Image: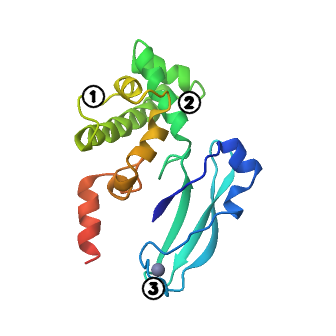
Amino acid sequence: MQLRYLIDLTMEEYIEQKAWEHAELDHCPFHPEGGCGLARHGTYPRKFPEYCLVPRWYCPGAHRTISLLPDFFASRFPGTLDEIEDAVNTAGSCKSQEEAAFVLRPEISLPSGLRWLRRRIQYVKEALTILVGLFVTECAPDLESFRKKLGTNRVLSKLREIAREYLPSMPPFVGFGPRSAKRYCRLGSSNN
Ligand SMILES: [Zn+2]
């Protein structure tokens, strides 16, 4: 499972300070009362946009690993929340998705670039739609509306904070849950 690594660092600062080495997990999310043998379990690498490490723990009681993801990273997806937000913003300011795909990913083929872009547009839309339903009422599920509503140019990072209670069941990139609600239900029932 993933949890937020509550540090106020940019990715550059995170790398420079090797912040993964200083991370601490106070208690096991599965056993808040303790006694389960929770122990540090190394790190795993994130390769984009820069190589760095994410700290990880293991709970022998639950047979689960727990990692602490810094807020600037997208969950279950390469790259940062800011990069994804920039890509979706670029798509909004171009005449077409084709043009945006070419501007953003000139080094790959147009069909690949379009897939790359549409996946980002779709997941951002999903996250914003869920959040509108949860609590940001009177707001359209698009970045422009959220920028105005929240008064920030970094909407996705801000949502990680605002939606913190819902992250385990929200889809990536903001949330730490599986990709679709359907899959989430199926996973839940197979564990019972
Ligand atoms: Zn535990």
User: Can you say whether 149 is above or below 134 in the image?
Assistant: above
Where disc 3 sits, the SS reads loop
Quadrant of the rendered structure where residue 139 is? top left
Q: Please, what is the three-letter code of the amino acid marked with disc 1?
A: Cys
- Report x, y in % for residue 14: 69, 49
Residue bearing mark 1: 139
Along the viewing direction, whichever of 105 and 153 lies nearer the viewer:
153
Where disc 2 sits, the SS reads loop
User: Can you say whether 115 is above or below 130 in the image?
Assistant: above
Residue bearing mark 2: 108
How is colour applied across the structure in the image?
A: rainbow
Q: Is residue 4 left or right of residue 126?
A: right
User: Can you say whether 101 is above or below 78 in the image?
Assistant: above
Labels 3 and 1: the sequence-earlier one: 3
Disc 3: residue Cβ within 8 A of ligand 1's nearest atom: yes
Say the numbered circle drawn on residue 52. Answer: none
